[in-house]
């Protein structure tokens, strides 16, 4: 088969794809359906999340009120090391370690957000600028995208309290000067 035949085959495949896409777009225009303003089905129990001025959501602020002392009592450093393996795809937690997709997390508890100079943080994280306390880290790890809107961290979060507490204890232990537990 020469290149001319191969070009005709590729052109036919591309033309077929364009025709299918074109028919779909034409059908959308021809059979336009206006969406209703109000949902036909009401689902009870859904929480409306509103964004506050500092980028955190109200639901995240409410989560922050968790008794951190009781939460950390659920955790275990060895369990935290196992759970942290989810984080190790993007983060390193080694003294003097390099930044990966995410910044090096050595000594993160007690450090201000966006404090590593040689890492390119998102604007949202730079604007956040608070200290990573046990409570802040707990709230953030539940769902990072919801807690700090616009963060680059594309992680679903840790839903289980024991997992969050364990990871926080593990990260605290990985520091030159670990913070005393509350």
Image (tube, grey):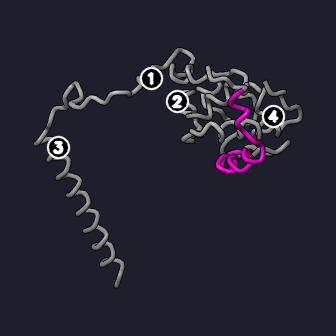
- How dense is the environment of label 2, judged by Cα within 10 Å: few (below 14), some, or many (20 and up)? many
Q: Secondary structure at mark 1?
A: loop
* Residue 115 position in % (x across, y down): 75, 28
Pick whichever of labels 1 and 3 is earlier in the sequence.
3
Pick whichever of labels 2 and 1 is earlier in the sequence.
1
Identify which residue, 113 or 43, lies in the foreground. 43
Q: Residue at x 62, y 36 (%)?
A: 161
- How dense is the environment of label 4, judged by Cα within 10 Å: few (below 14), some, or many (20 and up)? many
Residue that mark 1 sits on: 49
Which marked residue is nearer to the observer: mark 4 or mark 3?
A: 4
Q: How many marks?
A: 4
Residue 107's label in the rendered image is: 4
Say whether marks 2 and 1 touch (CB < 8 Å): yes
The quadrant in which residue 167 appears is top right
Disc 2 to disc 4, C-alpha distance: 24 Å
Of all residues shown, which one is farthest toward the left? 30
- How dense is the environment of label 3, judged by Cα within 10 Å: few (below 14), some, or many (20 and up)? few
* Residue 71 position in % (x across, y down): 68, 30
Which marked residue is nearer to the observer: mark 1 or mark 3?
A: 1
Disc 4 to disc 3, C-alpha distance: 54 Å
The prevailing secondary structure element of the residues shown in magenta is: helix
The quadrant of the image that shows the N terminus is bottom left
* Residue 102 position in % (x across, y down): 67, 41
Q: Secondary structure at mark 4?
A: loop
Say whether marks 4 and 3 touch (CB < 8 Å): no
Identify which residue, 147 or 92, lies in the foreground. 147
Residue that mark 2 sits on: 146
Residue that mark 3 sits on: 28
Please tell me whether residue 110 is drawn above or below residue 157 in the rendered image.
Answer: above
Pick whichever of labels 4 and 3 is earlier in the sequence.
3
Disc 3 to disc 2, C-alpha distance: 33 Å
């Amino acid at each position: 088969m020469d290149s001319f035949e191969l070009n005709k085959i590729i052109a036919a495949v591309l033309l077929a794809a364009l025709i299918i896409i074109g028919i779909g777009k034409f059908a959308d225009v021809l059979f336009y359906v206006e969406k209703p303003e109000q949902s036909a089905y009401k689902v009870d129990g859904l929480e409306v999340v509103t964004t506050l001025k500092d980028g955190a959501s109200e639901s995240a602020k409410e989560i922050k009120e968790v008794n951190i002392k009781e939460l950390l009592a659920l955790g275990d450093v060895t369990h935290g090391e196992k759970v942290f393996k989810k984080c190790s795809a993007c983060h390193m937690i080694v003294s003097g370690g390099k930044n990966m997709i995410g910044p090096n997390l050595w000594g993160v508890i007690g450090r201000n957000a966006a404090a590593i100079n040689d890492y390119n943080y998102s604007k949202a994280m730079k604007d956040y600028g608070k200290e990573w306390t046990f409570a802040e880290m707990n709230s953030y790890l539940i769902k990072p995208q919801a807690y700090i809107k616009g963060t680059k961290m594309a992680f679903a979060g840790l839903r289980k309290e024991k997992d969050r507490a364990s990871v926080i204890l593990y990260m605290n232990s990985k520091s030159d000067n670990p913070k005393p537990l509350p």
